[in-house]
Image: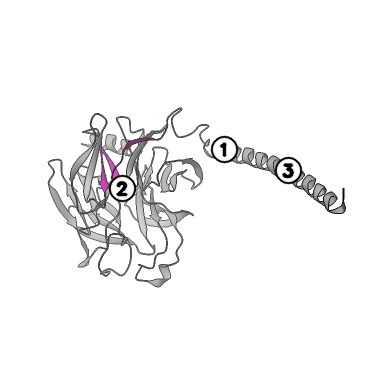
Amino acid sequence: MGPKNVRLSRSLKIATHLNHNSISSMKRLTSLLLCVFTFSVSAYGQSLVQPNAKVKKLGDGMKFTEGPVWLPDEQKLIFSDIPNSVLMQWKKEDGLSEFRKSESANGNILDLDGNIISCQHGARNIIRIDKEGKATLLADKFNGKRFNSPNDVAVWKDGTLWFTDPPWGLREPHEIPGHWVYKLHPKTGKVEALIKNLAMPNGIVFSPDFSRLYVADTGGNNRHPDSKYHDYPATVTCYALNNEGTIGGELFTIQEGSDGMAVDVKGNLYLTQGNIQVYNPKGQKIETIKVPQNPANVCFGGSDYKTLFITARTSLYSVKMVFPGAVSKRSVSQKNRK
């Protein structure tokens, strides 16, 4: 064997040895990652998803799904298909069908009387749809200037509507010099600007006891009229609230963004960022629920409020959870209140 062949043989032996070491290292790394993943989904000693439950598709064929909200009296889900300017409905017995036309509605929620509150991108307003189907304009301006395009909405315990106003549906120049979070008093029509220092406020939700407000910011975008917000990172900020609904300081910030969000009765926060990312009330990630398509929003529903409904691009999905959504407590409290 000549010198070249000897060098080649040694090189092959070294490469083989390195290859075996690499495979061994990869196995150890995989085991480590599996351990980390198992730990991350076991903050309660188990996954938040019910045993043997899987994410299942309930329907598809839409263009971009958003804004799911559960109607307990009718046991059905309402959600938006934004580009098609329609609100869709899903019922276990009937499947998918059209609920009503919209003006590119995005986020939806129920108010304390069971009416649907809908943020309409196209009309740049917030409307109320009563149980007979009548739509009433609640607000479309702040201090005489039109909103950008109301995106998502949450209901405070006194019935006021807190909503975000990024420009995702805006096709005209800004009238308001920012992307803000507002409070709307539906009985009087009064609108207050609450938060003005976010780049692209998006999802918004309260903790089960209303002591916290979570607001997602999808991050910097050159559509903001103030250039200092163009490079802002995507985040979710947790704000303290007092009993009157006044915003206090920032408790913590999650260093990833979200579209729509939901909370369960334990105060866990469900983000829509690539998959469903679940954080505990301390701001620590505890689980990732994988979804076939990128999710845009989530809500709890079903007879026990343990079904997590997921709007994701062209489809609607669901998965059974261990803990019910916080909205179930609110529904019960409202019935008792009446």
Pointers 2 and 1 in contact (C-beta within 8 Å): no
- Residue positioned most to the front: 1
* Magenta highlight on residue 194: no
Q: Which of marks 3 and 2 is in front?
A: 3
Dot 1 amino acid type:
Phe
User: Residue 66, labelled with which disc?
Assistant: 2
Is 140 located above or below residue 6 in the figure? Answer: below
Check disc 3 and report the residue beneath it: 21
Q: Does any portion of residue 218 appear in the rendered image? A: yes
The image quadrant of residue 133 is top left
**Disc with the residue nearer the chain's start (1 vs 3):** 3
Dot 3 amino acid type:
Asn
Label 3 SS: helix
Q: Where does the image place residue 264, in percent across and percent down from the top left?
A: 39, 39
Label 1 SS: helix
In the rendered image, which quarter contains the C terminus?
top left
Which residues fall within the magenta stretch? 53-81
Q: Where does the image place residue 217, in percent across and percent down from the top left?
A: 40, 57
Q: Which residue is drawn at 37% across and 71% down?
A: 226
Dot 2 amino acid type:
Glu
Is 303 located above or below residue 225 in the figure? Answer: above
Is residue 177 found left or right of 240 in the rendered image?
left
Comparing 274 with 314, the one in front is 314
User: Residue 183, labelled with which disc?
Assistant: none
Q: Residue at x 39, y 54 (%)?
A: 216
Check disc 1 and report the residue beneath it: 39
